[in-house]
Image: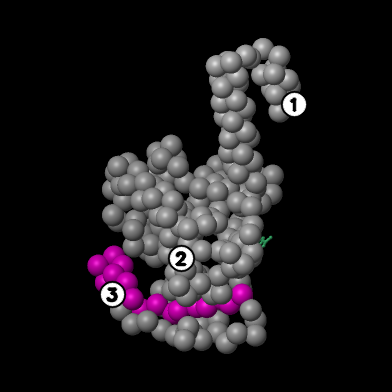
């Protein structure tokens, strides 16, 4: 592979006058490709503690949790895969995920990913695909980041075949560590339908505390459902109560 030093030497040896400008451009594009690759293969953007704002775009791009388990920001190229997985697991997913019925064609998956990328660009949210052994098995991300109150509302789902193996537990731990350490958020809040017993056991195992119940929180499959609201705080000394 062409190294930075070899590239500089090559530019110095062979370029004169306007060729030098061309050479400099080559160097710059080489650097930008390296930075881009670094960002893709490393967990997070570089950290600047204490200076986080919603414009800092400190959002997760991709992370290899284990050699076999990877999170990657959903891209338009993933729309077909995402839609295929939703189609194949529609009956299961629609029980607790309201968006499933609205995802009827490939275009809907494309729209979801495009909207997600726009929100990612403005640091309001992100959606990462979960790949287990190279296979797309679910999604995790923050549906909303409230920078004013330093709070995030995550969401997640896994196809049934990938469940019961601790995959989502590992993904949640990575996303929450990122929220508290990189984004420096103070609280993560999630609403789980009162009938979703597996979802409730899952969040409690992750250390969430139930703080309230929201009546008629969501329309799901034509009916109105209540949510238990759970909170996880960065600082265990903070009360697990709603923000003041
Ligand atoms: C919520 C959901 C993601 C949980 O999936 P899951 O497979 O139970 O979660 P994990 O992958 O972390 O697996 C945990 C389970 O695997 C087991 N497990 C096996 N190896 C494990 C490991 N190394 N670490 C942790 N758990 C492990 C655990 O015992 C646990 O099983 P249990 O619940 O019977 O005790 C899944 O049920 C889902 O997608 N539901 C539908 C969508 C939904 O409800 N989303 C949330 C809306 S708020």
Q: Position of residue 200 (x, y in %)?
A: 51, 74
**Residue 53 at what x, y percent from top left?**
51, 64
Please say whether residue 25 is visible from this viewpoint: yes
Residue drawn 44% across the image and 69% down it: 146
Q: Residue 3's image quarter?
A: top right
Q: Which residue is mark 3?
A: 224
**Residue contact between numbered discs 2 and 3, judged by CB atoms under 8 Å:** no
Quarter holding the N terminus?
top right
Q: Is label 2 in contact with label 1 (beta carbons under 8 Å)?
A: no
**Where does the magenta region start and end?**
217-234
Residue drawn at x 52%, y 57% as measured from the top left: 56
Percent of width and height locating residue 13: 71, 14
Residue 4 located within the stretch drawn in magenta: no
How many residues crowd mark 1 within 10 Å: few (<14), some (14–19), many (20+)?
A: few
Q: Which mark is residue 145?
A: 2
- Label 1 sits on a secondary structure element that is helix
**Distance between the alpha carbons at the discs numbered 3 and 1:** 63 Å
Point out residue 2 in the picture as x, y percentages from the top left corner: 70, 22
Residue placed most toward the observer, 53 or 173: 53
């Amino acid at each position: 592979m062409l190294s930075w030093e070899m590239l500089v030497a090559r530019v110095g040896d062979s370029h004169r006058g306007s060729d030098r400008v061309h050479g400099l451009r080559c160097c710059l594009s080489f650097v930008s490709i390296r930075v881009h690759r670094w960002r893709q293969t490393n967990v997070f953007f570089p950290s600047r503690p204490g200076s986080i704002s919603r414009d800092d775009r400190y959002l997760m791009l991709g992370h290899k949790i284990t050699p076999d388990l990877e999170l990657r920001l959903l891209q338009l190229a993933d729309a077909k895969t995402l839609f295929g997985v939703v189609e194949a697991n529609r009956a299961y997913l629609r029980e607790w995920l309201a968006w499933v019925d609205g995802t009827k064609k490939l275009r809907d998956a494309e729209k979801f990913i495009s909207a997600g990328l726009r929100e990612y660009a403005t640091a309001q949210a992100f959606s990462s695909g979960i790949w287990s052994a190279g296979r797309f098995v679910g999604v995790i991300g923050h549906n909303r980041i409230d920078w004013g109150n330093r709070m995030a509302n995550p969401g997640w789902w896994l196809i049934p075949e990938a469940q019961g193996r601790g995959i989502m537990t590992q993904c949640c731990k990575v996303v929450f560590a990122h929220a508290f350490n990189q984004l420096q958020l103070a609280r993560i809040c999630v609403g789980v339908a009162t009938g979703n017993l597996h979802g409730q056991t899952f969040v409690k195992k992750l250390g969430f505390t139930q703080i309230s119940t929201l009546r008629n929180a969501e329309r799901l499959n034509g009916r109105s459902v209540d949510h238990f609201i759970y909170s996880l705080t960065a600082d265990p000394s903070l009360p697990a109560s709603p923000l003041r």
